[in-house]
Amino acid sequence: MKKVQVEEVKSLHSRRNFLRISGITLAGAGLVMAGCSSDDDNNGGTKDDQKPGVRNGVFDLGGGDLGVLTYAYALEQLEADFYTRVVNSNTFGSTFNSEEQAVLTDLYRHEVIHREFFKAAISGVITSQDQLLPALEFDYGSLSFSSRAQVLATAKTLEDTGVAAYNGAGRYITTPDYLVLAGKIVSVEARHAAAIRSLINPGSADFAGDDVVDPTTGLGQALKPSQIITAVSALDVIQTKFTAQFLP
Amino acid sequence: MNIIKFLESFTTEGMINSMQAKGSRRDSFNQFQNMGKVAAMAAVPFGLSAFLAPTKANAATFMGPQETPTEALQLALTLEYLEDEFYAMALDSGIIPAADQAIIAQIAKHENAHVSLLANALGADAPAKPTFDFTAGGNFDPFNDYPTLLALAQAFEDTGVRAYKGQAGNLISNGDLLTTALQIHSVEAMHASQIRRLRGQKGWIVGSDRGGLPAAAQAVYDGEELAVQAGFNTSTVPNIPAAAGPESFDEPITGPTAVSIASLFIV
């Protein structure tokens, strides 16, 4: 399995580039996009035959609201793992200035809380433990956690991806309480994205740059789960295979 | 804009008729005291004093989505009108430091785009643009004092994030509208983060801390201290300080609460 290429991450000037790249490098991904459904009508509560769980030896995120929650749980696992490694790097204190350390430490805490929240929320509604997405494994390849530029660029990619993912997934949530909970989280992800972007290029418009906010409509990005999973899989960071057959 | 008329879109027809029939506001208030939650919601925007000296009840009691998708977008447009005019006046003020110019201009560009988008979407249902007074009756001087300008900007952005979040449930039946609202919502959050950081604050809201804003702005932050999400106590995560819990979730406000905050700046 090809590991994530640092050069590739560094070249991600914008998430649009990242997505364009991802579209042609899916083959190397750590995920299996087996027959990702584009069925937009799959909006009801999770049907019995669309529960999350292992199918043909691979965990599938499932469909309906439970599928969306499990999808969010997977993304939060990724973010939490990344920042956990960032703040626990033995060069953390020498790589980042005090402001950057404060921001990255907060992001680590927030993302771990988000991860644990989804684990608890999903555990509260599933009918058997094997419907809970297991702890995913991650490998960042040659990414250097002592490189300020590489860490911040990766953080930017993850936060931008998170915002676009929640924005795009909201319409597939049918339970109002879940929708509000997703809304409570996405705005914090957007706050993160702006902060990371301003650390990279302070005093500029990049905190909400034209690459992520359409300058004509003023709208942030919104991408379907299938688009997000394709993009994330291109990073080749997630080493645990899973499928998303029942998500749009 | 007549804020009472605007408010009417958030009340039931029966309540409006009742209000009109009762004549004076005091009469209406007296009658409302016995009329339950909907009546209480209706009373909020009349009392600017409720914003100037907020009580916890104002922010916490009025739960539950009440509005139609059209009404949700009308609220959104009114808030965008406010932000759009505020940032346009900010850019004209000449007091923005060169180092921050690109930031404020980017926000202004987005708010202007949001106004156009929502006004076009609403068409004939678009409310008229209110007349704004960003001094709030002479209490603030944002276009001659940059710290005040940033302070008001923070209040507007954090309010906007909460208000859009509060309308999400009202748009759940229309996927396209919901997605558009979420796409604006996340941009407001990016603005909020940046403005807060320009003020030396964290980009995220710490408890219900108003971050040095005047006490009158406390209503913007009341309720943000929530630590338990869907039964999950965020303070129980191992090795994570309890204060990080409320930071990691932004809380919604209802339409009437958003109106009551914005109405301080509407003539």
Image (cartoon, helix red, strand yellow):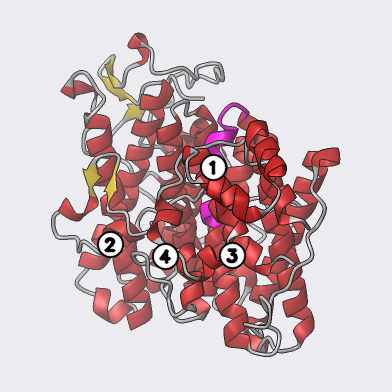
Mark pair 3, 1: CA separation: 16 Å
> Spatial distance from mark 4 to mark 3, Cα to Cα?
27 Å
Assess disc 2: are there few (<14), some (14-19) or many (≥20) residues with their C-alpha within 10 Å of its C-alpha: many
Write down the chain letter for disc 3. B
Indicate the chain on which mark 4 is placed: B
Which is in the foreground here, disc 1 or disc 4? 1
- Measured in 3D between alpha carbons, the distance from the residue under mark 2 to the one under mark 3, in whole angstroms, is 32 Å
Residue B109 occupies quadrant? bottom right
| CA distance separating discs 2 and 1 | 36 Å
On-image quarter of the N terminus of chain B: bottom right
Residue under numbered circle 1: B39
Tell me the residue at 19%/55% (across/down): B235
Q: Residue furthest left?
A: B238
Q: Amino acid at mark 1?
A: Ala
Frontmost residue, A34 versus B113: B113
User: Which dot, 2 or 1, sits closer to the camera?
Assistant: 1
Q: Which picture quadrant has residue A86?
A: bottom left
Image mark for residue B244: 2
Q: Quadrant of the C terminus of chain B?
A: bottom right
Specify which label sits upstream in the sequence, 1 or 4. 1
Identify the residue position indicated by label 4 in the image: B204
Please, which chain is the residue tagged with disc 2 on? B
Q: Are marks 2 and 3 in contact (CB under 8 Å)?
A: no
Closer to the N terminus: mark 2 or mark 1? 1
